[in-house]
Amino acid sequence: MRRKLVIGNWKMNGSLAANSVLLRGIVAGYAARNADCGVCAPAPYLAQCQSELTGTPVAWGAQDVSAYAAGAYTGEVAASMLQEFGCRYVLCGHSERRAYHHETNEVVAQKVLAALNAGLTPVVCVGETLEEREAGRTNVVVCAQLQAVLDVLEASAVEKIVLAYEPVWAIGTGKTATPALAQEVHGMLRKQVAERNPVAAANMPILYGGSMKPENAKDLLAQADIDGGLIGGASLKVADFLAIVHAAG
Ligand code: PEP
């Protein structure tokens, strides 16, 4: 059975003082037996995560990584730097990066490679916009996003990634995909991974993201191919985040 995984995406929120309250609250309240959890913090706060979370069951990670290993890329953060600050995870291809920073499927794939080369676990985000869903293009869009990543990976490396299905129309909008609708896409993504590496597909955590909250988490997490959540807004409140983690396991 796949172990559940719940990851918080703080986005561009936080301060040293607020993070400290949040991290200490999560550590103090974490009581999951069958679910792992982590937080993806803004890069400047990764040192704080490292000092607050080392030795606890809560992992941490970053929200983006450079596709390059080092060099003249002003403002970028290399995977090796994230690794030095103890990151386990890094989000790759979050829809906000794709939309506001013009990250293409190919760029996202290079970021996934860079993360893997540094020993990080990339959380590969895929998802369709409302316009794409309404045009009946959901499957084509998310499959192309996933395929671009699968195309650059050795078959064995596919076992090292986490996938997150995040319908763009559900992110930060309060609109959640129904459990059945999310399951349909998750099942399709798992089949696509299986064509490349069946063992990876069987073991891969596929997270759902998009307005997951304590009230809807249980039903979403009960679906056969939903292995956890990528949580934005609700990850900024200790009680809400822990309620989702505990709903997972
Ligand atoms: C996200 O940012 O990945 C996300 C799912 O946000 P929210 O939970 O706020 O919809």
Image (cartoon, helix red, strand yellow):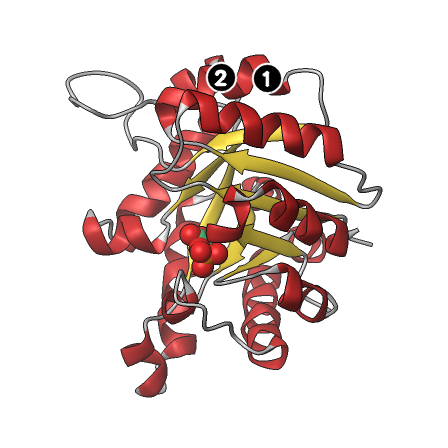
- Determine the residue positioned at 40% across, 32% down: 14
Relative to residue 188, is residue 220 drawn left or right? right
For badge 1, the amino acid type reads Glu
Describe residue 138's horizontal placement relative to residue 105 as left or right. right
The image's mark for residue 52 is: 1
Query: Are circles 1 and 2 on residues that touch, CB within 8 Å?
Result: yes
Across and down, in percent, residue 198 comes to: 67, 58
Relative height, residue 186 to residue 113 (above, below): below
The answer to whether residue 171 of the structure is visible from this angle is yes
**Residue pictured at 47% horizontal, 13% vertical:** 84
Residue 128 percent across, percent down from the top left? 36, 70
**Res 15 → quadrant:** top left
Quarter holding the N terminus? bottom right
Ligand 1's quadrant is bottom left
The foreground one among 230 and 172 is: 172
- Circle 2 residues within 10 Å: few <14, some 14–19, many ≥20: some
Q: Secondary structure at mark 1?
A: helix
Front residue of 168 and 107: 168
Residue sitting nearer the eye, 112 or 10: 10
Q: Which mark is residue 48?
A: 2
Residue at position x 62%, y 71% from top?
187
Query: Can residue 154 be seen from the camera position used here?
Result: no
SS for dot 2 = helix
228 relative to 155, above or below: below
Give the CA distance from mark 1 to mark 2: 6 Å
Q: Is mark 1 within 8 Å of ligand 1?
A: no
